[in-house]
Image: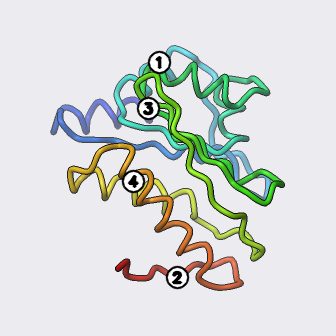
Amino acid sequence: MLFQLIKWIKSKNPEVKIIWDPILKASAGFEFHSVNDHNILKNILKNIELVTPNIPEMKQLLSSDDAEKNALEISRYCKVYLKGGHTQNKIVTDILFSENKQIKFDSKKFKNKEKHGSGCVLSAAILAHLAKKKSIEDSCMLAKKYTETFLSSNETLLGYHKKQK
């Protein structure tokens, strides 16, 4: 289904940039969908600009326990922004796999609870900066900063969007 949607969008505008935030499983455990067919996955990845999984999603995409190895494999088809927010460390490291490079983005882990939709906020912010003709590296860096502001906006599960200076 996802691949058909991507094909349709690309038929309308071949230059469109598509970012896929693969929400495979809800925090409560409900599984939305899975990608078990690697040929379908490969076709999806070949037709998008960037995929933005967190570590558990990356492990699930290729059924392997090594998220970074999986990201490297997937980066053969499209750019990968591996979100590191599920770590227990005080520093969160996200990694962009792009054109045989790995670019790391570090930030502190916020003490407040996780925010619903933070991955969607990040991917939307990356896409917004790409639409402004920023490079993928700059788009990811600016989106990471925006998402940090969102995550630190209050103590609840909801985040506030604030205008950037």
Of the image marks 4 and 3, the number of the one nearer the N terminus: 3
Which image quarter holds the C terminus?
A: bottom left
Q: CA distance from mark 3 to mark 1?
A: 8 Å
Of the image marks 2 and 4, the number of the one nearer the N terminus: 4
Give, as a three-letter code, the residue at label 3.
Lys
Where is residue 72? Give x, y as percent: 57, 23
- Residue 126 bears which disc, if any? 4
- Residue 79 bears which disc, if any? 3
Q: Disc 1 on helix, strand or loop?
A: loop
Give, as a three-letter code, the residue at label 2.
Tyr
Q: Residues within 10 Å of mark 2 (few under 14, many from 20)?
A: few
Q: Residues within 10 Å of mark 3 (few under 14, many from 20)?
A: many
Give, as a three-letter code, the residue at label 4.
Ile
Q: Residue placed at 38% from the left, 22% from the top? A: 46
Q: Residues within 10 Å of mark 1 (few under 14, many from 20)?
A: some
Is residue 10 rendered to the left or right of residue 36?
left
Q: Residue placed at 65% from the left, 49% from the top? A: 93
- Residue 121 bears which disc, if any? none
Give the camera-side residue of 95 and 10.
Answer: 95
Disc 2 target residue: 160
